[in-house]
Image (cartoon, grey):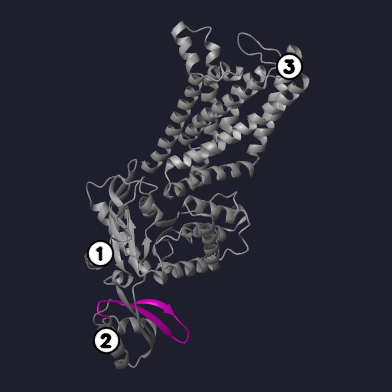
Amino acid sequence: MMRVLAFARRELRAAFESPVAYVAIGLFVVVLPTLFFFLGYPIGGVPLPGLWEGGQASLIVLFHWIPLLLAFVVPALSMGTWAEERRSGTFELLLTYPVSTAQVALGKFLATTLLAFLMVALAVLAAAGTVAYLGDLDWNTVLGGLAGAALLCAAYVAIAQFLSAVSSEQLVAFLLGALVLGLLWALPLFVRVLPGDLASSAESISPTAHYLGSFARGVLDASDAIYFGLVTIVGLAGGVLMVERGRWAR
Amino acid sequence: MNSVMSTSSEAAGARAAAGTPPMLAARALTKSFGPVRAVRDVTFEVGAGELVGFLGPNGAGKSTTMKMLTGSLLPDAGRAEVRGLAVDGGARAARAAVGYLPEHTPLYSEMRVTRYLGFVGEVYGLGRSARRDAVERVVDACDLDGYTDRRIRTLSKGYRQRVGLAQALLPDPPALILDEPTSGLDPAEIVRIRDLVVSLAREKTILLSTHVLPEVEEVCRRVLIITGGRLVADGPLEALGEGAGDAVVATVVASEERALELFGAVVNASSPRVVRRGDEGRLTLAFDVEDRFAAAESIARTAADASVVLVELRHEAPTLERVFLERTRAAREAERARPEAPPQ
């Protein structure tokens, strides 16, 4: 575990020693509450009004934005995970250390997930504080939304880091990550136009539906938690396999 | 080649008899990248305490071989071993026994030196106080005092190289694999790094690749030469030079025409070639010889009989550069002669 934490600490320090962490946190803390207060959530079948317009002491609109914003911010945080190690050559040294690739991958995953969650939590708590000041906020829903956001961050980071492991350049990793996570986010939008079976499949594989359907409403659903757990494990395992493939370069 | 190969296999035999596996071993290592066969059937052993130079032209397979010995690359065939343990993805004990400095010294440039070294200590599982001691030890060994709080990206290439060496030394491994540690450094830095390698060799097994042949001559007693992915020489430096062509150099006071006529038929030597035309009629001639003593005696007698002043007469041993060029050229020619040779 000490070795896992060594890699996690290194990743976190690297994020905070470059503008990446500050820009990402700033983006979330400024953009997310702004969208929540003023714009509402105009995407999908039932558009939701902003806080001022709707006048409801609830964060549901804010939680609706989280899967979409994370689909672009998480790839930005994760793009360098392996691609930058490859570019700088430190990848080769990593493979010679007496640690397993799983330990390295887990350390990197923990660091980026923590950073992504910190970013979301700061934005959510800032908005929650304001709403609680204005009205009667249900804090259980806030905690449910945050717990779901943590699982969502973990699943997104695992997928984005896997895509960083298959990319030789950071930009490619970012674009691939944004594309894949963006598509996963968009799947529920197609539910209305897809035939029955396909529609339910689209809904069941989209993290957006698993987040908004339960956690964002303050409901802790075991099947949704299992879904996020599985996606995270598959993403992590895929990343480890891709990194190990580096030893077999041909 | 046969004689030098037998020298290293004798050492291997002695180790086998003593029951101790070699510190590093390449056993029929083979690796291809697409159609390019980067390393072919490379076999050698490096015993504990040896400092071995690993030479070869660019693209000869040095770095690929070193990567296989450190586990960052796995061979298509053959086996890399550290202390008898196979180096592969799972062999942590084998990897822990080797400190590695890759070519171009990849480091986390945004980190400060001590923090980076502390991180390497954590990766090797050192506890807090062991880590602090290890960082102190390598900072001292690599002369990094005064640079410990600097970010790595702000360091000169020489200091980055020292940080690279420090990370390789941090877990105090019994073996070091150093891939071109002096490449791109200024002369003063080259001397510092070379001195450091020599001092480390008192306690550690070192496999050192370099392009700088005099460096190998100065620090290594044994040399491996690889070209076209094949090992073409393995043996002590002196033995590699045997048969590579001795020369005798004579400086006489005579006109070029007379000297060439007089020394044209020296026993046991080739026709002379003029190496240098000096002041006061001095002329330096070089003879390729088979028996240097017989040739030297014949040159001295010829000069004395003709009353030509012989200012200097010396033996010129074959340089590593000459050995290297001859071995690599011979290997290239042999490769071309193979009808089934794959494209390179």
In front: B274, or B141?
B141
Task: Tell me which segment is drawn in magenta.
Answer: B271-291
Relative to B127, say whether B314 is above or below.
Answer: below
How far is mark 1 from mark 2, CA to CA? 42 Å
- Name the residue that disc number 3 marks: A51
- The residue located at (42%, 60%) in the rendering is B173
Left or right of residue B264: residue A106: right
Chain letter of disc 2 in the image:
B
Q: Which of A155 and B231 is in front in this view?
A: A155
Q: How crowded is mark 3: few (under 14 residues within 10 Å), some or many (20 or more)?
A: many
Amino acid type at circle 2 is Ser
Q: Which mark is residue B298?
A: 2
| Residue B31 placement, left or right of A86 | left
Q: What residue type is labelled 3?
A: Leu
Q: What element carries label 1?
A: helix
- On the image, the x and y values in percent for residue A11 come to 56, 42
Question: Few, some or many C-alpha atoms within 10 Å of disc 2 (few <14, some 14-19, many ≥20)?
Answer: some
